[in-house]
Amino acid sequence: MDQEVNGLRVIIVGATALGMDLAEVLIKNNCEVIFIVREEKLAKDLSESLDCTVINAEGTRPDILEKAEIDKADAIVACTSHDQDNILVGVIAKGYKVPEIIIMTEDVQFMTVAKKLGFHHVVNPPQATAAIVYHTLRGIDTIELSTMMRGDVRFISVFAPLKFAGMKLSGIALPKRSAFIGVYRDDLFMAYTEDPEIKEGDEVLIVSRLDEVNGIYEMFRPVEEEEKKEQPSQ
């Protein structure tokens, strides 16, 4: 994994605990980090303690992101304390075709909104932590997905577009080295073995090899996005 991360140019927007910890980890792994921090004093302190570029500004402003050379970024991590700002940063980054866009949300509702807007990497620290603590209190030793992602194996979730509505899960053909895990419909989970009938907006969980992930995202792209993508630029 170090070889994949080494040398990446990453923009971090927001000096939350996640943002600061991530900056330190990336710097130690020889990444070029551009840290956009709103608070003046904190930005000054971080510029003195971290070996990276620190920009004291509002990270949701396109001109600031351009100053950070967003067009040259390999990834951007939006982790401010405001979910709406993080989604806005993600939308701007999409316009610049940043390869990897990672959004942090505190509210599960905004996590769902972000995923429905087509963002594939959305993290929700409170939800993840609450689940771990809950299972620990119940005496259950849960296996985190992060410990299961070895080599080029990835676990992803996508929302079912209208074109798959009414189809059985088994009727959707994935690349041969990928497999369905199951489907979430609101809080109801249906395993692949139940072969549920898909409804538009269902969250579909898939295990895949890294080289097949982008193809799966394309499969589940809403029809209107496909048509927009195919339209010639004016």
Image (tube, rainbow, N blue to C red):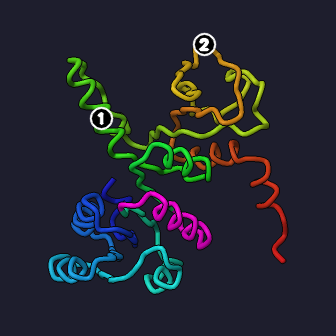
Residue 208 part of the magenta segment = no
* Sequence-earlier tag: 1 or 2: 1
Q: Nearer the viewer, mark 1 or mark 2?
A: 1
Q: Secondary structure at mark 1?
A: helix
Residue occupying image coordinates x 66% and y 33% = 174
Hey, what amino acid is under mark 1? Ala
Q: Is residue 103 above or below residue 180?
A: below
Name above or below for residue 166 compared with residue 201. Answer: above
Q: Is 102 placed left or right of 23 in the picture?
A: right
The residue identified by callout 1 is 130
Residue 151 in the image: state x and y as whole percent: 39, 42
Residue 14 position, x and y percent, is 34, 68
Magenta: predominant secondary structure element?
Answer: helix
- What residue sits right under mark 2 in the picture? 194
Which span of residues is magenta-colored? 81-99
Circle 1/circle 2 CB separation < 8 Å:
no
Whole-percent x, y for residue 114 in the image = 54, 51
Secondary element type, mark 2: helix
Residue at 50% across / 44% down in the picture? Answer: 109
